[in-house]
Image (tube, rainbow, N blue to C red):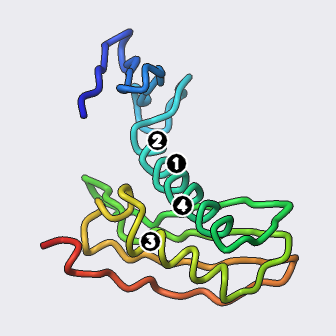
Amino acid sequence: MKVLLRHSSENTFICKAPSNHWLVLESASSPGGPTSATSPFEALVMAAGGCVSLDSIAIIRKMRKDFTRFDMEVSVERAESHPKRILAIHFHATFAGELTGDEIVKALDLSLTKYCSVTLSLDRSVEIKASYTCNGTPGPEWIVPRNLETYS
């Protein structure tokens, strides 16, 4: 796959993927400064959340389960010094519908260990955690095991 990044202004790029959709990326001129677009790091975290979300919904639908709500919240822990890489990433899914906790765990685990190309492209040292809330009831948080065969 190839993408095009075209410099637009000081710290701004417009980017086009093979899908022919454009995305604007920007970083602040100074740390904590204002921006008018998504930063590359934010885009990475959103891509991870989007990948896990799309996988999870597809898996839940294959289980023939109905849901009326789905939200995914992704939080990351970053190193304090440069390159400020991701140390841990936590995916929290919120569902409402006819689902059990076991079904949600299965969907998240399948995505995070087998299907999500974004999270599976992260360095093996990144700790991946998952949790869920179903119909207003919080479920457990767990550390998702990394399948080392994926990286060989």
Callout in the foreground (3, 1): 3
Q: Residue at x 31, y 58 (%)?
A: 85
Q: CA distance from mark 2 to mark 4?
A: 18 Å
Q: Which-is-in-front pick, marks 3 and 2?
A: 3
Give percent across and percent down for residue 143: 46, 86
Of label 3 and label 1, which has the lower sequence position?
1
| Residue position marked by numbered label 4 in the rendering | 55
Q: Which residue position holds label 1?
A: 46
**Vertical side of 44 occupied by 139: above or below:** below
Q: Give the amino acid type for the residue marked by disc 3 in the picture.
A: Leu
| Residue at screen point 59% across, 58% down | 53
Q: Distance of mark 1 from mark 4, alpha carbons?
A: 14 Å
Q: Which mark is residue 43?
A: 2
Q: From the image, state whether disc 3 or disc 4 is nearer to you.
A: 4
Q: Residues within 10 Å of mark 1 (few under 14, many from 20)?
A: some
Q: Are marks 1 and 2 in contact (CB under 8 Å)?
A: yes
Q: Nearer the viewer, residue 30 or 10?
A: 10
Task: Report the amino acid beneath label 4.
Answer: Asp
Residue depicted at 64% across the width and 61% down the height: 57
Left or right position of 69 against 8: right
**In the depicted view, which residue is nearer to us: 34 or 17?**
17
Element assignment for label 1? helix
- Disc 3 designates what residue? 112
Instruction: Say if mark 3 contacts mark 4, CB within 8 Å.
Output: no
Relative depth, front residue between 23 and 26? 23
